[in-house]
Amino acid sequence: MRRMVWAMMALVVGMACGAQAAPKKNKATKRAVELDVPRDQVIAAALYTVHGNTLKLNAQLFPLKPGEPRDVRLEIKEPTGWEEIQRVKVCENEYGNASKDRSWTALFRVVDWDDTRDVRYRVAHGKDAFFEGTIRRNPVDKEEIVVAGFTGNSIKDIHGGDISRQDLVDNVKKANADLLFFSGDQVYDHTKHYEYWLKFCLDFSEILKDRPTVSIPDDHDVGQPNMWGEGGKVSTAFGAADGGYRMAAEYVIEVERAQTANLPDPYDPTPIGQGIGVYYTDLSWGRISFAILEDRKFKTGPLGAGAGVGTRQDRADHVKTPDFDVKKIDKPGLSLLGERQLKFLDAWGQDWDGADFKVALSQTIFCGGAHIHGKVGGRLYGDLDSNGWPQTGRNNAVKALRKAHAFHYAGDQHLATVFQHGVEEFGDANYSFCVPSIANLYLRWWEPEEPGGNRKPGQDPIFGEHLDTFGNHVTCHAVANPSKEPNGGDKLTTRAAGFGLVRFNKKTRKITMECWPRNTDISDPANKPYPGWPITIDQTDNYGRKAVAHLPTLKIKGAKNPVVKVIDEGTGEWVYALRINGDTFQPKVFKKGTYTVEVDGKILRGLEARQLNDPEVVEIEPIHKAM
């Protein structure tokens, strides 16, 4: 996919490293980690991705002292020893608070990277500080790609305290995960991201060092209880319900630099308001094309939507009365992903170069995924922090994903769920998997008041087809509700904490979702995921819309698993795209008319949609036969 000029991105990074903000007062709290470490331990961790033969690696350092070198080296292990391949300056921008936190990051960008082999690397500072790991080869020939998913990583006392993450680290190793995905709230302190991010790095460095990682910040990471970025405006209302950011732009920029600078270059790096950057992009790894989205950055704030008055007594994002007409707050002009990201998804959905699957990674799922909030009895009739609102924006996002047959992997809700989404009717769109929180304070429950439709015999009424609190079509296939004990009990399992694994089988085109509790050995056959998991679906289930008619069956000669794109000649719009599994495919369509079909460069025009299961067969030989 064609990207914007790297020079613009370099300008944004330069702004992030150069800006300084005036200190703000901050309550004295204990340190998340000790900052004055032995000088051979000043490199805490490194996060990396490889995309399009470009390596981006972001090293996180502890504070450097006056007089110490400000350059950091990237070295790789060759038969003759360690060879330095790049040297960069540390970015040490001050966040702007009383603790004088700084970013202390070092970003390496290496083009023409050979991704066909494992490479041992080390980040080096001075004479004695080294952090070693492995840049893995691109697993393009691996039959099954495993992506480990996490959300909600709090170490605060009120969230259960600093509980060891070693069980998560060990299970990632046992699953031999190919990619790590942290969907948000890696940090829960709202004023000292650096300290708590260092703690995150230390807790997970053992797996970060050897695997590509996608870490995307959410509201708590950037210092807010909830966030509606609204294009970067300054927020002044209680709970940031007017939209925008409460913390200084310099703080937000540095949080995003620490967590996302290792991602591939942004699709369009143009900054939003206050000079805050963007990171939405795509990542190709193991023949899976990932769209990395920013759910919150362009979303409209709820204060003007009419759900509340935005005071401490009545939150603007919570609908508390059952007779409130939620359709009234789906107003023209409200934004969810925003036009920029929808444009990106439109381009990404058509680009299947080197990809067998399409997967969207984002902070949270596109529906109101819970009914009970905070405690037993805390029923809401709409949560505007969820991506079920605004409904028009939600539908636009879901339609964009289903055109690409994209599976959606996310977090944030503190509640593990699997939904199949619908736009016009139940089940006509893609599946989503929301992973459980690593540590779970704010509990939520999926507990609809009406039984679901089209359930399996004997299945709990909470499953099946439902309208969420905003009237969106969703089919619930699995949920890991917390215990109904006071405060959800006192265990990670009763509070439904855990993590997710998704397995993408490129041979069968099956997607298997697993939802695991904390402190469980996944390699022990006696241990099981949360009830309802694992769930396996077919790739094509992510466009579940029922066919009105079919085009002739395509018999494709001389090509292995070609890409098929269907275009409606009446509107000129592409209907969907998919790399098929095999050499035979009958395109389904959703209205009568004529269509153009593109098969790896070969174009067939004027194909008429006449009936379901059209018996006609068309032989075609593509122009481009490479996978």
Image (cartoon, helix red, strand yellow):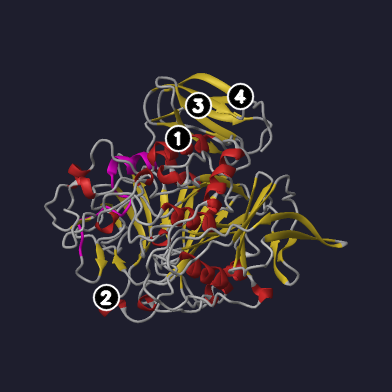
Three-letter amino acid code of the residue under disc 4: Lys
Callout 4 secondary element: strand
Residue at the far left: name it. Answer: 323
Three-letter amino acid code of the residue under disc 1: Lys
Foreground: disc 4 or disc 2: 2
Which span of residues is magenta-colored? 379-397
Q: Confirm whether the magenta stretch covers residue 393.
A: yes
Mark 3 — residue?
552
**Mark 2 Cα shell of 10 Å, populated few (<14), some (14-19), many (≥20):** few
Mark 1 — residue?
343
Q: CA distance from mark 2 to mark 1?
A: 43 Å
Callout 1 secondary element: helix
Front-most of residues 94 and 267: 94
Q: x%, y% of residue 219?
A: 38, 58
Three-letter amino acid code of the residue under disc 2: Lys
Mark 4 — residue?
602
Could you tell me which residue is drawn at 45 percent across and 35 percent down?
343
| Residue contact between numbered discs 4 and 2, judged by CB atoms under 8 Å | no
Q: CA distance from mark 4 to mark 2?
A: 58 Å
Q: CA distance from mark 2 to mark 3?
A: 54 Å
**Mark 4 Cα shell of 10 Å, populated few (<14), some (14-19), many (≥20):** some
Foreground: disc 3 or disc 1: 1
Q: CA distance from mark 3 to mark 1?
A: 31 Å
Front-most of residues 283 and 280: 280
Give the mark, 2 or 1, whose residue is nearer the N terminus: 1
Callout 2 secondary element: loop
Three-letter amino acid code of the residue under disc 3: Pro
Front-most of residues 35 and 123: 35
Give the mark, 3 or 1, whose residue is nearer the N terminus: 1
Mark 2 — residue?
484
**Mark 1 Cα shell of 10 Å, populated few (<14), some (14-19), many (≥20):** few
Could you tell me which residue is drawn at 41 percent across and 67 percent down?
188
